[in-house]
Amino acid sequence: MKLLIKALIPTFILFSVFARITALDNLHRDINGEGNAITIQSLMFYFSYVGPLLYAVLFLTQLLIIVPVWNKLLNKRKLVLSVLGACSLLSAAIGYIVWNPADSYYTLLISVATLFGVQAIYWALNLLMLYAIDSIKYFKPQPTI
């Protein structure tokens, strides 16, 4: 039961928060000023059709990889450093893949920084929730007077 709680609660809360932030983000509505505006309708379309698949992948990753690794590691500091290293490498790789070489290196840097920030915040909150769930030993009712 605790395994299911560790997989379900952090993924559902964080996925809901990031989906809401993405839907309400006014900063990145227009792509390159070319009229390819991302509208609320297109974001809702994206999340209504692709969102369940993204959540399923997120849930299975949490259930099959993250929670077993979390339970086996005695030194949680190594896990945090490993996650930060993975976030750095993945954000640099994805940022380079989506970067247009005709643009400046500044756009590459902004892309990598944004990707790293989103991943680092997600994993920091995820690991914090796992730690909080582990710190709750039992759900005992309080004695009444």
Image (tube, rainbow, N blue to C red):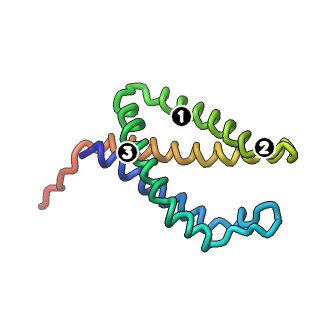
| Residue 81 pos. (x, y %) | 54, 30
Q: Which amino acid does label 1 sit on?
A: Val
Q: In this view, does 115 lie to the left or right of 17?
A: right
Q: Is residue 32 left or right of residue 84?
A: right
Residue depth check, mark 1 versus mark 2: number of the one nearer the observer = 2
The answer to whether marks 1 and 3 mark residues whose Cβ atoms lie closer than 8 Å is no
Which of these two is toward me, 29 or 76?
29
Query: Which residue was labeled with disc 2?
Result: 108
Q: Which amino acid does label 3 sit on?
A: Ala
Q: Which of marks 1 and 3 is nearer the N terminus?
A: 1
Q: What number is the disc on residue 132?
A: 3
At 51% from the left edge and 33% from the top edge, which residue is drawn? 80
| Residue 115 pos. (x, y %) | 65, 46
Q: Circle 2 sits in a helix, a strand or a loop, which is it? A: helix
Instruction: Report how far apart the C-alphas of labels 2 and 3 lie in the structure.
Output: 36 Å
Quarter of image, res 3: top left
Instruction: Report how far apart the C-alphas of labels 1 and 3 lie in the structure.
Output: 18 Å
Quarter of image, res 84: top right
Instruction: Report how far apart the C-alphas of labels 1 and 2 lie in the structure.
Output: 22 Å
Q: Residues within 10 Å of mark 2 (few under 14, many from 20)?
A: some
Q: Is residue 142 left or right of residue 123?
A: left
| Residue 17 pos. (x, y %) | 51, 60
Q: Which of marks 2 and 3 is nearer the N terminus?
A: 2
Above or below, comparing residue 3 to residue 69 in the picture: below
Query: Which residue was labeled with disc 1?
Result: 83
In the displayed orientation, state which residue is furthest to the left. 145
Q: How crowded is mark 1: few (under 14 residues within 10 Å), some or many (20 or more)?
A: some
Q: Circle 1 sits in a helix, a strand or a loop, which is it? A: helix
Q: Circle 3 sits in a helix, a strand or a loop, which is it? A: helix
Quadrant position of the C terminus in the picture: bottom left
How many numbered marks have been drawn onto this rendered protein structure? 3
At 34% from the left edge and 45% from the top edge, which residue is drawn? 6
